[in-house]
Amino acid sequence: MTTYLNSAWYDSMVGLVRVRPGDDALDASVMGHTLQLKPRPEGQFGLRYKLFGMIPVQVSAFDGIRISMAKVANHDVLVGHFGDDTMLVGERLRPAPVPQRLLDYVGEYRIVGQKLGIMPDRLALRLEDGLLVGECSFSELPGFVLRIGLNPISDTELLVSGLGTGKGETILATSKGKDKVLLFSGLELHKVTN
């Protein structure tokens, strides 16, 4: 395997993806599930689902899908190949140093105030292998965990990483009294304390 196949974070059209080298393939963790990326000719990878995160099984829906890695305008990207069609699937993220003040915001959160539409049941800000990760799950989508990479741009602001819809938005880290508060897209999130 070449050096760019080492463990890496990618933002994708289905959320944050953690890619790690396996024995003879790559493992990709996405939305609470694990996929195996098996090397194929022409620098592409085929997809197999890993049952219980361990046992690779063929899923017919993945048969015509291939993934490759490319560099586009100084961005390391994942490219999806679907028959004769190709499309941008994701971008590699490079974790930035996390200011000490933002580490105090790592934890579970609850939404305060008026809730509009479908809202997540569980919200969290995590630090994983140097990357700040926003995580949420919905009772309407059991078993799926939506995760986004966050890049600190100051000790009070986080940028939603990646390319595409919703990327580049900011999250403000502030306080209300003794509560740690995150402000994002009209939502007020308060850190849950024990």
Image: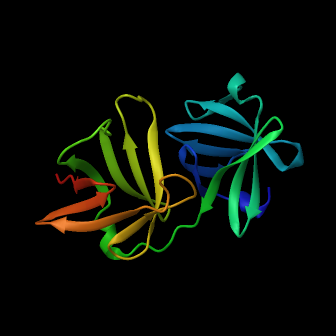
Residue drawn 29% across and 63% down?
105
Q: Considering only vertical position in the picture, is 178 above or below 134? A: below
- Say left or right for 135 vs 40: left
Single out the residue that lies furthest toward the right.
41
Q: In this figure, what is the number of numbered marks?
A: 0
Toward the viewer: 130 or 66? Answer: 66
Q: Considering only vertical position in the picture, is 96 above or below 143? A: below
Q: Residue 10 at what x, y percent from top left?
A: 60, 55
The quarter of the image holding the N terminus is bottom right
Residue 59 visible (yes or no): no
| Colour scheme shown | rainbow
Residue drawn 72% across and 57% down?
5
Q: Residue 154 at what x, y percent from top left?
A: 38, 76
Single out the residue that lies furthest toward the left.
177
Q: Residue 186 at what x, y percent from top left?
A: 28, 54
Q: Considering only vertical position in the picture, is 121 above or below 88? A: above
Toward the viewer: 136 or 57? Answer: 136
Occupied quadrant, residue 91: bottom right
Residue drawn 32% across and 40% down?
120
Residue drawn 58% across and 46% down?
13
- Say left or right for 167 vs 100: right
Occupied quadrant, residue 93: bottom right
Q: Residue 67 at what x, y percent from top left?
A: 74, 44
- Say left or right for 78 vs 29: right
- Say left or right for 154 vs 47: left
Residue 173 visible (yes or no): yes
Toward the viewer: 99 or 190? Answer: 190
